[in-house]
């Protein structure tokens, strides 16, 4: 049967039949029905897997985006305080100039309802005195989904620098 090298086995050869019997037409049809039923059951399993995994994947993606948004928010507050402290070190600078610089930075970064505190007064600070710029902003109004996760919290960042001439 397999002595001819040009002959390739087909599904009608005895090796492909059950218990060495030849397959009749009805056997082939029933095998096809079994295959169809199995693929139909597999499609149902895939739908169930999707129904279970998709909400988890969406939750993971939204949580990641929200966490990164809050990291950006906290970093933006720190950069704003740093830039305000740098302005406070300029000779002839004043507290309103520091606050104006900080508010400009907050506007560029779309941070709402922030407060800027400068201690002590920049104009009256002596050489060698530490000037601290503090920027605070509520999380609820500045995050994507932060209203649920960070309700009532206020982030605050401070930078201190020594006044020199």
Image (cartoon, rainbow, N blue to C red):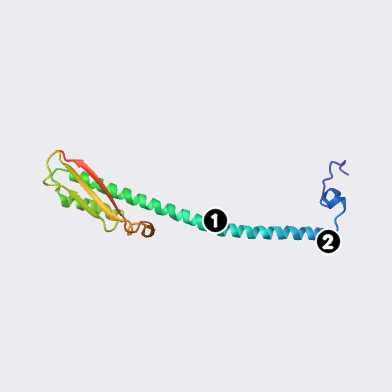
Coordinates of residue 160 in the picture (x, y in percent): 22, 43
Horizontal arrangement in the rendering, residue 142 relative to residue 98 (left or right): right
Residue 77, percent from left and from top: 29, 50
Locate the C terminus and report the quarter of the image it occupies.
Answer: top left
Out of 41 and 75, give the one closest to the viewer.
41
Q: Indicate which label's residue lies in the foreground, 2 or 1.
A: 1
For image coordinates 17% across by 51% down, the residue present is 97
Q: What residue is at 11 percent from the left and 46 percent from the top?
A: 124
Q: Looking at the figure, which quarter contains the N terminus?
A: top right
Q: CA distance from mark 2 to mark 1?
A: 41 Å
Mark with earlier residue (2, 1)? 2
Name the residue rendered at 73%, 57% in the picture. Answer: 35
Q: Is residue 149 above or below residue 157?
A: below
Closer to the camera in the image, 137 or 24: 137
Q: Can residue 12 be seen in the rendering of this structure? A: no
- Write down the residue under mark 1: 53
Residue at the (23%, 51%) spot, across then down:
102
Can the viewer see residue 152 in this picture?
yes
């Amino acid at each position: 049967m397999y002595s001819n090298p040009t002959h390739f086995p087909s599904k009608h050869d005895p090796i492909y039949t059950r218990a060495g019997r030849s397959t009749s037409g009805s056997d082939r049809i029933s095998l096809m029905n079994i295959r169809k039923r199995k693929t139909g059951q597999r499609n149902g399993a895939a739908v169930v897997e999707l129904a279970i995994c998709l909400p988890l994947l969406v939750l993971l993606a939204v949580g990641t985006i929200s966490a990164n948004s809050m990291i950006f928010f906290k970093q933006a507050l720190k950069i704003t305080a740093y830039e305000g402290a740098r302005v406070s070190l300029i000779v002839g600078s004043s507290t309103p100039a520091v606050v104006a610089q900080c508010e400009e930075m907050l506007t560029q970064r779309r941070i709402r309802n922030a407060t800027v505190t400068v201690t002590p007064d920049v104009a009256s600070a002596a050489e060698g005195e530490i000037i601290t710029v503090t920027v605070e902003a509520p999380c609820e109004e500045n995050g994507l989904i932060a209203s649920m996760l960070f309700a009532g919290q206020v982030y605050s960042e401070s930078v201190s620098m020594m006044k020199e001439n």
